[in-house]
Image (spheres, helix red, strand yellow):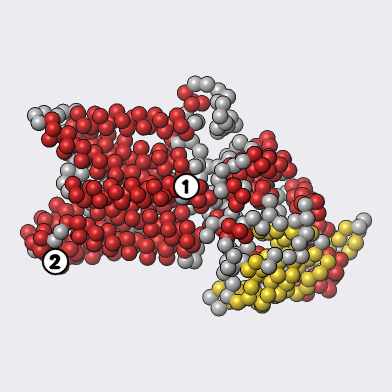
Amino acid sequence: MPHDHALSAVPSRFGLKAALRRPAVVLSLLALAVLVVAVAFMTVGVKGNWEFALAFRGRKLLAICVVASAIAISTVIFQTIAGNRILTPSIMGFDALYALLQTSFVFFLGSARLASVDSRLLFAVETAAMLAFSLALYRWLFLGARRGLQVLLLVGVVFGLLFRGTMVLLQRIIDPNEFVVLQDRLFASFNGVAPDLLGIATLVIVAVSLVLWRLRGRLDVLLLGRDQAINLGLDYRRTVSLILILVSLQVCVATALVGPLNGFEPVSFFGLLVANVAYLLVPGFRHAHVLVGAALIGILLLAGGQLVLEQMLGFGSAVGIVTEFVGGILFIVMLLRGMAR
Amino acid sequence: MIEIEGLTKAYDGHVVVDGVSLTIPRGGLTGIIGPNGAGKSTLLGLIARLLAADRGTVAVDGLNVATTPGEELSRRLSVLKQDNSIAARLTVRDLVAFGRYPHSRGRLGEADQAMIGRALSYLGLEPIADRFLDELSGGQRQRAYVAMVLAQDTDYMLFDEPLASLDIRHAVSMMHLLRDASRRFGKAVVVVLHDIDIAGNFSDRIIGMKDGRVVCHGSAGEVMTGANLTAIYDIPISAHRLDGQFVTTYALPEGAAGA
């Protein structure tokens, strides 16, 4: 690395390279890219009724924006608290829990009865159940005795396996007709999002993001680790508990809205990919910049991916597969390069 | 003044700090010495509220550290533990600027900037102020952290083995600096030290610990005797004065070069 890392107000060197060291420039470029993709997403390949197409695609785009930014923001913050760049809520068994919950609903209630339940109530129950689990797990992980990264990863993997094992067991003994219904519920889909749920989810995620935005200074301090955060005057337990509630809420609402991004697998690398691309592209460490950058990159990846794969190449819902593939490679590279520490 | 009263901490039934009662006055450098596992770092962690005590209290200027809001304490007391690792990429200047957080809440004013500049120059970090921490040597990183604590500008500063990754030149200059800070600005500096000679020569007071208890506590001259050091470390140690400095020697096996 060269020595001229100055991020001062006046760039010492002109040109693209110097400009890309300024957070404002990078974030503006990302925002511009998101805008271009959004316009393309709304208009490319529209045939027939424009009014219907715009409304339909607008809802889909909103769902993508909400979900992508929720996962991007929650992953970055989760990693700040975990003190490494490899753990994500998904890796800690979150998506597997969602799949298990869905399976349990269909198994114990039956699809017929499930269909008659108010979707908003179901949404609330799903969110609450996942929130309860994630809070119990995260508080135990981060506020109890200190544990190494290996232990955390192992705990995540074991929980993921437990949830998936239970789910597979239930799916084996379920009525085949019910299984078809279940399978439909489990795949991440931005097409089938109900408008009323989308409204609630957007509201929750925007509200939570605003609270997190107000905490950005404290998040920066948390980067220094528990001891230094306490030394600098943070009420560590309270701050971390609050942030974990907010992060869990975001992941829960996003997952409950569209399902886990990759369907069946217990690990989703989307958050990992987005967060690490953000660390790479956005200069500096400040959450004010990294969080915005991560959200924009998330939207770019999901919306752009859907656009290219569905509209241009006609591959259906393959975005999840691509992000999993790229994210999984990144995960392995990070582990091998010892970046996990 | 730091007042410690009946402080006890156990891990899984194993008592690490055992009913310690101490008073550390404001001003001057206090060295804490003792063998591995004597409870030095734990004591420091308890004083700095990084750990919760099982029994007993710690009060800094009359404020109980267990109940006083962290924000208030962070302007009076600072602590630097041994291992600090950060996943994010920070420059030296970024890190030192964090020391002003208790005062500025993240919005750095002119006074804060001046303080950061002073801390950087005090530790000779200006040439590397804009380098990233992960590009530095262990010793440079250690000095960056100490600069951060100095920028925090508290009356009480606690350091857990700040010399661990420093060579003798930097170790001695670090001790000069900490002693200077305690003398010139009336700060109370408490340092956990491994090197007995350095502790003897730079400390105004020394606390000797063993098995979670304070074995001896007094001025450097009082503590630096063969009898005391032998009692603390459980090996025959004798203390001498040579050109006005404390020099300790320990028993060598027969036929070794020094014998």
Residue type marked 2? Leu
Marking on residue A216: 1
Residue A50 in percent (x, y) is at 13, 30
Q: Residues within 10 Å of mark 2 (few under 14, many from 20)?
A: few
The answer to whether A307 appears left or right of B248 in the picture is left
Is residue B164 or residue A284 the one in the foreground?
A: A284
- Outermost residue toward the top? A15
Number of disc labels: 2
From the image, tell me which residue sits under label 2.
A109
Q: Quarter holding the C terminus of chain B?
A: bottom right
Is residue B221 or residue B169 the one in the foreground?
A: B221
Residue type marked 1? Arg
What is the distance, in whole Å, between disc 1 and disc 2 at their CAs?
42 Å
Residue B113 in percent (x, y) is at 65, 40
- Outermost residue toward the right? B243
Output the chain of dot 1: A
Residue drawn where x is 71% and y is 54% of the image: B163
Helix, strand, or loop for circle 1?
helix
Helix, strand, or loop for circle 2?
helix
The answer to whether A183 appears left or right of A164 in the picture is left
Q: Quarter holding the N terminus of chain B?
A: bottom right
Question: Image quadrant of residue B231?
Answer: bottom right
Q: With respect to residue B112, does A246 lie above or below?
A: below
Residue A336 visible, this angle: no
Marking on residue A30: none
Pointers 1 and 2 in contact (C-beta within 8 Å): no
Residue A1 in percent (x, y) is at 55, 33
Residue drawn where x is 24% and y is 62% of the image: A125
Is residue B37 or residue A133 the one in the foreground?
A: A133
Output the chain of dot 2: A
Q: Point out the frontmost of discs 1 and 2.
A: 1
Q: With respect to residue B181, does B22 lie above or below?
A: below
